[in-house]
Amino acid sequence: MAQPYKNEGAEYSSQPQKKHSLSRLSPDEQLNWSQIGETLTLLALAVAQIDTSMKEGNDSVDTLTHSFTAIAGKSRLLLDHFAKASSEAPDEIKEAAEVIHQEVGKAVVAFQFYDRLSQRMEHIGESLEKTGHLISDPAGRYMEREWAKLQDEIKANYTMEAERIMFEHILAGRSIAEALEIYHHHFNKPMDDAFGTDDDIELF
């Protein structure tokens, strides 16, 4: 846990926050309108939308994964049967079973990418919520050291070099468009394929 430190006569100690505890009501804002309160509202909304979207997506993908895994198992049984010398199935049926098995395998691999995407989105939600908690703290939000610590925590979640590069360029003052262009140029990725499933770059 971070140790308390002084800043212009004020004492501040970082406290761990519970997940999904962010709201617009900070100690000094209460119900009065303010830019801070509106910012917290939008951050809380974004975190809630990410969480519900990923929950719904995870449920659907889990169902699809189980279904395709079952199909892959049945197609494997067919292939094993056709491999027997006594099998008299037409060649086109054997080929169809092989194609089905291969295509289902590709689908299962694609679903594995979604798991990595889910982890990435969860990290984004956590980062937004941590940002909101810092903004809501009347002492911490004015301390440069606390913002630097938050940035370090966010950066520590990145395992993909592309994310670290975008992070550094955004902090350097580049626009989102400029940071994305640098990423696509650096990794030779087409602009419409930013989240491909290439195995040569670790996404998470």
Image: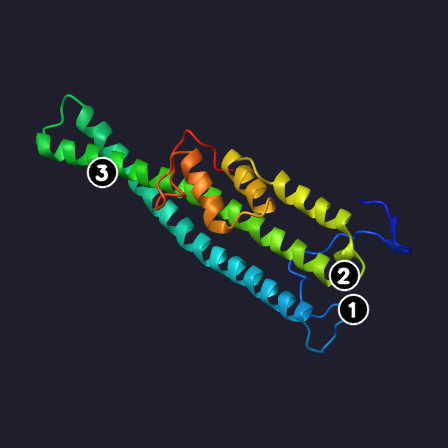
Contact between labelled residues 1 and 3, with CB atoms less than 8 Å apart: no
Q: Is residue 186 left or right of residue 46?
A: left
Q: Is residue 188 left or right of residue 160?
A: left
Q: Residue at x 17, y 28 (%)?
A: 82
Which residue extends farthest right?
9
Circle 3: element type: helix
Inter-mark Cα distance, 3 to 2: 56 Å
27 vs 108, nearest the viewer: 27
109 vs 150, nearest the viewer: 150
Residue 185, quarter of the rendered image? top left
**Amino acid found under the numbered disc labelled 2:** Asp
Residue bearing the label numbered 2: 137
Residue 60 x, y percent position in the rendering: 40, 54
**Amino acid found under the numbered disc labelled 3:** Ile
Residue 66 x, y percent position in the rendering: 38, 46
Circle 1: element type: loop
Name the image quarter holding the N terminus.
top right
Q: In this view, does 19 lie to the left or right of 146?
A: left
First in sequence: mark 3 or mark 2?
3
Image position of 199 with respect to 24: above or below = above
Residue 57 x, y percent position in the rendering: 43, 55
First in sequence: mark 3 or mark 1?
1
Q: Residue at x 55, y 62 (%)?
A: 46
Camera-near label (3 vs 2) is 2
Q: Which residue is drawn at 71% across and 70% down?
A: 25
Image position of 181 with respect to 92: above or below = below
Residue bearing the label numbered 1: 27
Image position of 46 with respect to 157: above or below = below
Contact between labelled residues 2 and 1, with CB atoms less than 8 Å apart: yes
98 vs 50, nearest the viewer: 50
Instruction: Report the coloring of the rendering.
Output: rainbow
Inter-mark Cα distance, 1 to 2: 7 Å
